[in-house]
Image (cartoon, grey):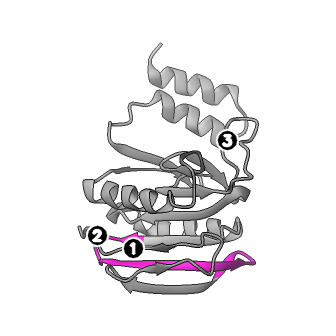
Amino acid sequence: MTVLDDRIEMAEESTELTLDVMFEWLEKMPVPEGYKTEIVGGHVFMSPQRHHHFEIIFDLLQQLHAKYSRKQLASDVRIDFPGRLNGFACDVAAISDRSVKDGKGHWRYQDIEFVAEVISKDTAANDYGPKKDAYATAEVPVYLIVDPYAGEWRLHTLPKDGKYHGAVSFGFGEDVDLTGTVVGLTLRTDDFPRD
């Protein structure tokens, strides 16, 4: 039986499209090495990981490690968020120290304190649109968008009623002051590379 036959057989077995079913399909597909795959609003997105993106992600993880243990930090790990079929692989997520994984071994969105997305040209609209809305609906306290093409960052805070009510943006080189948030740190951006 081929991979396509397996996918059809799986689709016929399940009458309801769920994130688990969709991720099972993705696991059986030949996703190219070096591509990030996530599901946003029931749509599958694959984007290549670029070295500049990795540098920013790694830099953020190192800085967040001042407060969060390695076990509380995640990158490109599936986390399901509210809304229709939202299984995101956040570039960076910081999880509360009181968190526990759900019955499937996944982090719960209710325990996320910080999310950062590093913009890719092909999926930037997701980070600024449906993903931002899902993070606000999930009441993720701090959402940081880092755009290496524009050389700037945008910080979203104060989630309520499905929207972020606090927003600020600056160019690379300006610190991201999170001392007034649950994160309680200041993140440096002067070493973030531009793409």
Q: Are marks 3 and 1 in contact (CB under 8 Å)?
A: no
Q: Mark 3 falls on what kind of element?
A: loop
Residue under the image location 58 percent in, 45 percent down: 71
Left or right of residue 37, residue 7 in this image: right
Q: Which residue is mark 3?
A: 17
- The circle on residue 145 is none
The one of 66 and 74 positioned closer to us in this rendering: 66
Q: Answer with left or right where residue 106 lies relative to residue 168.
A: right
Q: Is residue 4 visible?
A: yes
On the rendered structure, is 76 left or right of 190? right
Question: Is residue 147 or residue 62 the one in the foreground?
Answer: 62
Judge from the rendering whether residue 160 lies leftward or rightward of residue 167; answer left or right. Answer: right
Q: CA distance from mark 3 to mark 1?
A: 42 Å
Which residue is disc 2 drawn over? 191
Magenta stretch: give its range: 146-164
Instruction: Check disc 3: other Cα within 10 Å, few if <14, some if 14-19, many if 20+.
Output: few
Q: Secondary structure at mark 2?
A: loop
Which residue appears at 61% of the width and 79% of the height? 157
Numbered disc in front, either 3 or 2: 2
Residue type (three-letter) at the residue carrying disc 1: Arg
Q: Is residue 153 magenta?
A: yes
Question: Which numbered disc, 3 or 1, marks the residue closer to the eye?
Answer: 1
As drawn, 155 above or below 108: below
The mark found on residue 188 in the picture is 1
Q: Residues within 10 Å of mark 2 (few under 14, many from 20)?
A: few
Main SS, magenta region, reads strand
